Amino acid sequence: MPTTYDLVNSRLAVAFDSVLAGTDPVLRPSERCDYQANGVMAMSKMLGKPPREVAELVVGALDFADMGTVEIAGPGFLNVSLSPQFLSNQLSTLLNNSRLGVDTAPSENVVIDYSAPNVAKEMHVGHLRSTVIGDALARMYRFKGHTVIARNHVGDWGTPFGKLIEHLLDMGEDAAIATLSIGDLDTFYREANAKFEADDSFKERSRLRVVALQTGDPETRRLWRVLVDQSVAYFSEVYAKLDVLLTPEDVVGESYYNDMLQAVVDDLQEAGLLVESDGALCVFPEGFVNRDGDPLPLIVQKRDEGFGYAATDLAAVRDRVTNVAAQEILYIVGAPQSQHLEMVYAVARQAGWLSDSIRCEHVPFGNVLGKDHKMFKSREGTTVKLVSLLDEAIERADSQLRERDTGLTPEARRELATSIARAAVKYADLSTERQRDYVFELDRMLAFEGDTGPYLQYAYARIESIFRKLEVPVALDATTFTLAEPQAWQLALGIIEFPVAFDSALRDLVPHRLCTYLFDLAQRFTAFYDACPVLSASGDLQRERLALCRLTGDTLKLGLSVLGIDAPEKM
Ligand code: ARG
């Protein structure tokens, strides 16, 4: 269904066009009226007529009586006020629309590269951001009707595996598996590193092991698989704890591309892009220079003949276009990898793998900081385990609930605490402008007041409790809205804005815009609920107010769910 915004905008566009062909209004929601339209100024310059006169021409050409009224304001703004009748019709349509006005788009194949932790290494807060943002975007794309192909590009290849496998052998396979399966990945990694630094014979064994791995020695490959499988099983536990949709099938790690690397080199060779530099094979993509203005290389094959991170990423783009038939590829990766990825895309374009019709984009994000506004570290100065953060959030949410007599069984309370903790952590991450850093502060994130996940969950649960308190159910599908109180009117304007907010957040890949919208809607609801009692009202007025509650609740629930946040019925 067309959104209210679209309906108003297209009606105005006709009038603009009739005054001066090719000009469009720019509409934005306004506090004073319902929408304010810009564009008259620009037109007046082009026509060489005073803005006021042009505004009058537009209004004269406008056919708007069935939607509301348009008035000229200031030097040339157009203030749009909707009629109650029109707004009421819009709300009625939404009441019977489970998508709450969000249209589906023609389906495209969208590859989203996200999470991507490294085998035998702990997931840290950087992976939290990639995972949470990637999951939200995956859900939003799916809701829009696209086919999302998740690619969990785990770091499962390279020289570190020499020492990791040797360490596994030293420990004994069973003991190593036991350590890894309890998720103590960092200890395992640290011990392997320490031996590598201290013991020359271990170093030599590790070096030989890398060769054995690369040449496909079966026993070495088996041991490598043990490490990968243990780690993936552990990552899956973290994903379950976070409630993100990634599965082991989405793990398409760096090693997956091994067999394609030679073809990548051949393709680049054939395209005449490969240059030998210091014994390494490189591509110098157009437009990338260092500070001195010298061209920057993307190293495809190192001097020792090994392929690196860049070659794998090149093979991945090639595979995603040719085999996965991706029409859009998104990389949810931290901002520091921006230049690397841009160079990969540039080479992929020059090699002819990526055509201009494919949107291939880095979706960068900022850092998670500690309370001291420095990089988030544990008290011991090590990186913070993602799971411990979540566990702590669950603990705190649980003790908050224990203080409030909820009447829940310990199991039910634990489940609710888990849901609140996830909401807190995910919302704090998603509601921050993506590129900005944020401070990880559990107390703020878990608060029931302010711009937090639990606040939005609570707003939803409060609406559900209104319906539970109703003695007789009220049928809402045939509601007429009078919207007499300004708070009801403002709430209605908020509700009809959902598809606009959703589409704009998806288009610009900025989940925080949807968060801002939901928070604003919850606040409009609070103002409405304070001014317009629901349970003590009766008849048509109660029906109308209940319908506004229903629409708000549904919008909050749907909006949170496409962000990967669930909304419990009771809190
Ligand atoms: N494994 C990498 C890391 O932990 C992230 C990989 C990102 N994805 C990619 N296609 N390069 O930093």
Image (cartoon, rainbow, N blue to C red):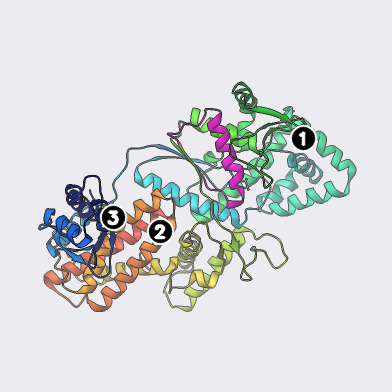
**Most extreme residue toward the left, as rendered?**
65
Can residue 525 be seen in this snapshot? yes
Q: Quadrant of the C terminus?
A: bottom left
Whole-percent x, y for residue 378 in the image: 68, 65
Q: What is the CA distance from the residue labelled 1 to the residue labelled 2?
A: 46 Å
| Residue on which the image places disc 1 | 210
Residue in view at x 74 percent, y 29 percent: 305
**Most extreme residue toward the front, as rendered?**
48
Whole-percent x, y for residue 10 in the image: 21, 50
Residue in view at x 18 percent, y 48 percent: 14
Task: Tell me which label, 3 or 1, sits earlier in the chain.
Answer: 3
- Residues shaded magenta: 330-358
Type of amino acid under label 3: Ala
Residue 42 tag number: 3
- Label 3's element? helix
Q: What is the CA distance from the residue labelled 3 to the residue labelled 2?
A: 28 Å
Mark 2 surroundings: few (<14), some (14-19) or many (≥20) residues within 10 A: many
